[in-house]
Structures are given as C-alpha cells and as structure tokens.
Image: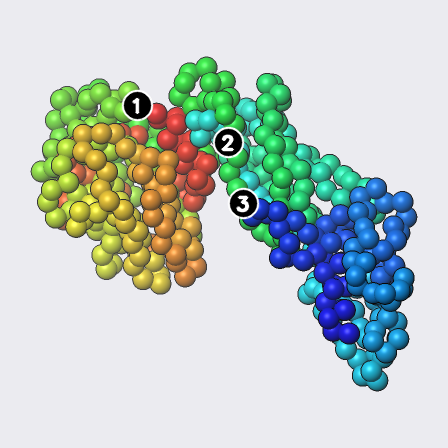
Amino acid sequence: TQREMDLLADAIVGNADIASGTQRADFGYIGDVGSFPPNLDALVTNPGAYTTWDGPYISTEFTQDTDGYKTDEWGTAYSYSGGLTISSNGSGSTITKKIADAVSDYTLNMFSGTILDASNTVPSTTYLDSVNINITVPNGSGGTVTKSYVPDSSGLFILDSLPVGNHPLRIIFTPNVDTLYSVLTILPRHKTSRTYKFAASYFTLASGSGSGGGSEPPDLVGHWKLDETNGIIASDNSVYSNDGTLIDMDSTTDWITGKISNALDFDGTNDYVSIPYIPELNGTTQLTYTAWVYPRTWSGSIRQIMAKSVHGGGSGRAQMGIFSESNLLKGRAETIAGRYEVTTPLPVLNTWNMVALVFDSVSLTLYVNDTIVGVTPLPNTSLVQNSDNLNISKRVGTNQYFFNGKIDDVRVYNRALSTAEINYLFNLSN
C-alpha cells in the first residue's frame, strides 16, 4: 500500500529521477495542468476536456483492474480530494502519504533574470519597453496562459506565480523582432535567477555614442569625474556638489588624459584628493565604491585607491576602502560585526581597469572591470559610522599608502549596485 501511494504521489507531482539529458522531464499531473488533481480519477481520465492534460499518469502496470489504483491492499478506497495527502484506512489504522508541504510549493514559484545586450549593457529606461518577456504556463483548469513582463532599467525581471514544469520562455527585442528562446524548468519552491544576452549590442549602439546605453544608476552621492584641466578643485558632479581638494599636487601637470576625458596623476609619494565629510557618504546597510585606475606600480606595503577609513579598516576610524596589500587587491569593510575583507590578484600594471566594491549587509563583493572577482559572506550587519573625509590615493589619519598611477571617474553610491549596474558603468566608461 505504501508503495502504491508513492506511485500515486509521483503521478500527481512527477518523478524527479526521470530526466531528458540534464533536464527534469516528469512533473506529473501538476506539470501539465498547473494544479493538483481534484481526485484520483483525474490521473486516468481527463477531468473536463483539458487540452493540457497528457495522461493517463498511472502506468498500466500499476494494477490488474481498471480501478485498482484507487484502493489499498485491503480493498478500501484511498482518501484523496485534491489536497496535500493521500490516506489509506483499510488496515484498521491510518497510513498517510504526504505529497507536499504546501500547494504553493508546486503552483506559486518565482524566477528572476537579467537582460543584457552583447556588450553587457542594460536596457535602461529608454529601451526597457522595447523588451518583452513572455512565458506560457498551464492555467490550472486545462488551458494555458501567456504571462508578459518587461524588465526594469537595470535589466531585471521577475516571473511569479509559476507552476512546476518545463515552460517555453521568449525574450523579444521588439524593434528587431530578435527573440531569445528557452525552456524554463521550474522546480518546487523555485527561486533562482539567470542572465540572458542578446547577440547584438542593441542597448549600446542605440545610444548613438558607443559609450553604452542605459541610464545612470540612482542613489549617486558622490561623483568626481576628474575632468578638470587645471586648479586644485576636483568637482563633485553629484547633486551634493561636495568638491574635493588636491593636496600636494601640481595644479597644472597632474591633470592628464584619462580613461574618460581627463584624470589625475598621483606620484605615490604625497599626492591625494581630500573630500569633505557629508552624512550621505556614510553607508549603513548598503554602499558602493567605483573608480578607474591605471597603476604604475603596486610595490610598497599598501597602495590606497579610495577610502573613508584607515586604508580600508582600522579601529575607531573605519568604514570601507579599496587598496593593495600583500600582492592582493583588497576591499575591506569595518562593520558592527567586525572587519571583513574580499581579495583578488592585483590588476595588471599600466592598464586601465575599473574596480568596484559593493557592501549590502550580507556580502562584500569586489569587481574588476565587469567581472565579480571575489565575494565574502557577511552576517547581516551594517557599516560603522564616522565623520572622516573620503580620500582618493591616501589612507585617512596619517600620510601613508599613497597610490602610484592614474585615477579617473570616482563614484560613491549609498546603495548596493547590482551586477547589471556595474556592467553599465563599465560599458559607459569603456
């Protein structure tokens, strides 16, 4: 009887061991119809001219007579009326087979994805309406429904209320009728994500500049383009206008050609930019630093790129920073739960690379260019707070750890940027 009840459960929700290649192939009645069967009869007989019903779901070897699958070994009918359990009472005591913990495990699942073009550029607010995401799923009553979605400006889309099964997914760039086809396998309690890329640079080329499509990520609290040609002021192009001051730098010769327009040249001895404290630069549960760097040398104990901290850490004067140490590129965050680091090999010399450090309470993520190069898990914590300046090319507190090379386009966001947004910044600057 227990074996028969197992087979009945498989007929309802499918057998996870049956696959086609690496893809699960059997989701039973629910996978075809999108709901639990109203009774056991529906496993053998179409309950109402359902077009998606593909039974019988009970093998002909299951029983020797037509209705044998509905009764236990004692000839008593199984108890099932569309719920989460099948019961047998023929032995004088109740034997129960649990099919699922909740109906929603099989009928209300979620999938998220990110859409990029061939240059890893996000759609932006300009082109998000030009992308349609369509998924066709059973509607629970014998037919199908096609759900349509559009991504947000970062390329993110979320598909919800999905039943288990293999469902056709189409992502269409409508101006060119370019379509990405996929079969999306939805498993019970499904919450996963995937990146989809068009083969052409639609969002990049559509901007007409080659500098990347898309729009600026929000929550920019500091943006020092370093595009000046002379003087000791590094203008902040964010809404806060929190300008930095060049310290021990030549007001003429240290302004040079950069990655994007101009940049600053740091001598590795005493050059740095000091940016005054404003509360907005203090992240709490989220913070992002980005900068383009062109190192001439990493030699020396530490080379600071940017920090609102003592080279990215240090008791009492800490928050977050990006720097080199011990032949590694490091991102460091001082949190109320302690100090955390994420590391990667040093970027190559005499080449422009974008570096980014993202803090989001549960992880510290380091990027080089548009690639994640390290992730450190965190215990759901927040950054310590301070009123220190933000420095470019020097630690806070003492005159040490100066960067040797060029730095361009320094940004601070008081939000954790997504991978798609980091990709956008990389392509914008590239």
Residue 426 location (% of width, % of height): 37, 31
Real-space Cα separation, disc 1 to disc 2, in angstroms: 26 Å
Give the distance between the C-alpha atoms of the residues marked 1 and 3, in whole angstroms. Answer: 33 Å
Question: Residue at coordinates 76% horizontally, 48% vertically from top-left?
Answer: 32
Indicate the amino acid at tag 1.
Answer: Ile
Question: Where residue 342 sits: x, y (%)?
Answer: 30, 51
Residue at numbered disc 3: 193
Whether label 3 touches label 2, CB < 8 Å: no
Q: Position of residue 375 (x, y in %)?
A: 36, 50
Instruction: Find numbered disc 1 in the image and state the secondary structure of the residue it sits on.
Output: loop
Q: Which three-letter amino acid code belongs to the residue tagged 2?
A: Lys
Mark 1 vs 3: CB contact within 8 A: no
Q: Which residue is drawn at 36% across and 54% down?
A: 376
Reading the image, the residue beneath label 2 is: 197
Locate the N terminus and report the quarter of the image it occupies: bottom right
User: Relative to 317, is 199 above or below?
Assistant: above
Mark 3 belongs to which amino acid? Ser
x 67%, y 42%: residue: 167
Between the residue at mark 3 and the residue at mark 2, the CA separation in whole angstroms equals: 14 Å
The answer to whether 34 appears left or right of 116 in the picture is: right
